[in-house]
Image (tube, helix red, strand yellow):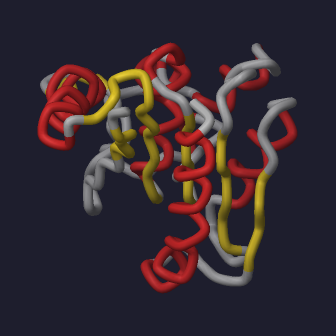
Amino acid sequence: DRAPAVVFPNGGNHGYWHDRRGAQWARYVLDEVIPRAISELHADPKRVAIGGVSMGGFGALDIARLHPHRFCAVGAHSPALWQTAGETAPGAFDDAQDFARHDVIGAARRHPSLFKGTPVWLDAGGADPFQPGDRAIDRALRSVRLRTYPGAHEGAYWRAHYGAYLRFYAAELASC
């Protein structure tokens, strides 16, 4: 029995993990990171989860919504989700069209059963500035529930919850 793999891309302050002009980040995750993780970990390619914090949480949701057959579970931990192109941070998207192509909240509103059958962990601190977007996706999706805990959009919050994240991935990948 081969082990599962959790792919957890981290872009620091600049990794939104979507394909855009000059940078094919989602393609990189799908075509290079995941196959390498499977190879090096001798993992089962049918037992892969994707997750991330902040921009990585956005990326995990976006990649998984575009390639749902690739993942057994998705973790979005304090995902950096905006509801409109005008809200985004400078450089997060190439332009309004790029935002529209990767608008996870908009996709969820149009398709409330998005992620149906794929377990999704969505959490954020109560003082997280991305709470409006996180609440919007929670309202839009039937199968996803936002977990809100004390804390902000920062490393201390995520470190305090890594154990819960790992338990989620372990449980979901065990039944995959």
User: x, y percentage for residue 125?
Assistant: 67, 73
Tell me if residue 99 can be seen. Answer: no
**Does 66 sit above or below residue 88?**
above
User: x, y percentage for residue 105?
Assistant: 67, 32
User: x, y percentage for residue 10?
Assistant: 29, 55
Q: Which one is in front, 94 or 176?
A: 176
Residue located at (42% from left, 22% from top): 46
For the C terminus, which image quadrant? top right
Q: Tag count in the figure?
A: 0
Q: Quadrant of residue 6?
A: top left
**Does 128 sit above or below residue 22?**
below
User: x, y percentage for residue 103?
Assistant: 57, 27
Q: Is residue 159 left or right of residue 138?
A: left
Residue located at (54% from left, 50% from top): 169
Looking at the image, the residue that sits furthest to the front is 1
Q: Quadrant of residue 93?
A: top left
**Does 39 sit above or below residue 30?**
below
Q: Is residue 111 left or right of residue 169?
A: right
Residue located at (20% from left, 43% from top): 41
For the N terminus, which image quadrant? top left
